[in-house]
Every structure is written in structure tokens, then in C-alpha cells.
């Protein structure tokens, strides 16, 4: 019995020694996970596609643009509470898709239903989303939604440009359009003919 206890004690000591000497493996969270650790406490910025730092991603990096928060920010900017930061390259609070050619490039059927919140979700997604990822948001009308997938980077006239696929679902019917947009300033994206 005594030798049995001695053998058990030796086995336990060996096991404890092995566990204690094993290196601790720490892993970074996946890229789609929200920041709850060091980044959330010390680095409150989201780095954009061209290196610009943004204070909020409005859920885009997690795959869903928060249209309500986008609308609140746009409303505050238009109402003067934030000043003119939507139009200022230095202090812009959200990227936008601007220009009058939106419907002409992605199709009248899709473009006519998009409002300024949709344009902001679209532009901020082009600004922050990596190629191969996608973001989804609900449209202004019930039963309508959009999914945007950036597909590749290129340059035109010294501007950073991106190709994308945009899917609009409305009342169970899907429409897909491919297009391109270029960056004309800090967070100012405009559609171009590919």
C-alpha cells in the first residue's frame, strides 16, 4: 500500500510539473470579434482602407451596418450639433458615398431607393471593410436590405478605388450590381464607370 501511495504521489508531482512548465498560449481574437481588451481601452480608432483613423465603425467590421446610429450621426451633423464634420476632411465622423451618378452606375432600380443613411453605410463600408468580407444593412423601407462586398483595389488618376458587388433584396427579390468607386478625400467615395 505504501509503494502504491508513493507511485501515485510521484505521478501527481510529474503531472503538476508538466502542466506548470508548459508555455501559456495566448491567441488574438478573430478579426470579426468586437474589441473588448486592450484596443477598446487604449486605441479607440478603426483604421480605414487608406490609413485614416475613424472613431466608430458603426458595426461594419462585424458585418452589419447600424443604420439607426448612422442616421443619428448624420442628423446631428446636419442639425449643427457636430458642426460640418461630414464635409470636412480633417474631422469627418463617417465616410459617405457621394455624387449624383449613383443610380446611373448601379442602376436606377437600386439607386433610387437609397437614402443618405444607405449612402453612409455604403461609403463607410468601402472605407473600413477588407476585400472578401461583406456587410449587410436594412434599407429605409420595410422588406428592403443591402449587402455590400468589396472585391478589389485599383488606382485611377492617383485615387484609391475599389470594385464591389451590391445586392439589394426587396420583398424577396434580389438584384445584384457590380461597380467601382474611388476615394476623393477622407471618406468621400464616388461611383465611377468601370
Image: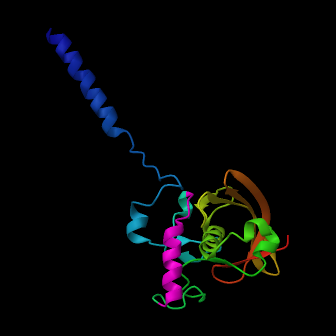
In the image shown, does 139 or 49 lie closer to the viewer?
139
Q: Is residue 131 magenta?
A: no
Q: Residue at x 42, y 49 (%)?
A: 26
Total marks placed: 0
Relative to 18, does residue 105 appear above or below in the rendering? below
Q: Residue at x 30, y 28 (%)?
A: 15
In the rendered image, the residue lying farthest to the top is 1
Q: Viewed as shown, does residue 6 lie left or right of 193?
A: left
Q: Position of residue 91 (x, y in %)?
A: 54, 86
Q: Quadrant of the C terminus?
A: bottom right
Relative to 134, does residue 191 appear above or below in the rendering? below
Relative to 11, does residue 83 appear above or below in the rendering? below
Relative to 9, does residue 132 appear above or below in the rendering? below
Q: Residue at x 64, y 57 (%)?
A: 134
Q: Position of residue 85 (x, y in %)?
A: 54, 87
Q: Residue at x 64, y 61 (%)?
A: 130
Q: Is residue 73 magenta?
A: yes
In the rendered image, the residue lying farthest to the left is 2
In the image shown, does 7 or 154 lie closer to the viewer?
154
Quarter location, residue 94: bottom right
Q: Position of residue 183 (x, y in %)?
A: 71, 78
In the image shown, does 114 or 160 lie closer to the viewer?
114
Q: Quadrant of the N terminus?
A: top left
Q: Is residue 82 visible?
A: yes
Per the rendered image, the range of residues in magenta is: 63-80
Q: Viewed as shown, does residue 142 lie left or right of 97?
A: left
Q: Position of residue 40 (x, y in %)?
A: 41, 66
Q: Is residue 153 visible?
A: no
Quarter location, residue 108: bottom right
Q: Viewed as shown, does residue 30 lie left or right of 95?
A: left
Amino acid at each position: 500500500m505504501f509503494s502504491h501511495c508513493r507511485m501515485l504521489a510521484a505521478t501527481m508531482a510529474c503531472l503538476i510539473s508538466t502542466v506548470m512548465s508548459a508555455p501559456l498560449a495566448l491567441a488574438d481574437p478573430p478579426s470579426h470579434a468586437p474589441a473588448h481588451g486592450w484596443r477598446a481601452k487604449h486605441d479607440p480608432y478603426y483604421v480605414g482602407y487608406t490609413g485614416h483613423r475613424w472613431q466608430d465603425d458603426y458595426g461594419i467590421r462585424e458585418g452589419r451596418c447600424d443604420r439607426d446610429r448612422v442616421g443619428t450621426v448624420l442628423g446631428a451633423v446636419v442639425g449643427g450639433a457636430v458642426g460640418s464634420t461630414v464635409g470636412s476632411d480633417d474631422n469627418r465622423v463617417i465616410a459617405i458615398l457621394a455624387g449624383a451618378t449613383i443610380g446611373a452606375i448601379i442602376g436606377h432600380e437600386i439607386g433610387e431607393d437609397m437614402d443618405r443613411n444607405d449612402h453612409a453605410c455604403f461609403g463607410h463600408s468601402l472605407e473600413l471593410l477588407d476585400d472578401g468580407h461583406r456587410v449587410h444593412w436594412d434599407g429605409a423601407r420595410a422588406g428592403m436590405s443591402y449587402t455590400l462586398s468589396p472585391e478589389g483595389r485599383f488606382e485611377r488618376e492617383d485615387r484609391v478605388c475599389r470594385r464591389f458587388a451590391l445586392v439589394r433584396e426587396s420583398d424577396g427579390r434580389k438584384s445584384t450590381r457590380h461597380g467601382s468607386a474611388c476615394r476623393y478625400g477622407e471618406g468621400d467615395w464616388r461611383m465611377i464607370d468601370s
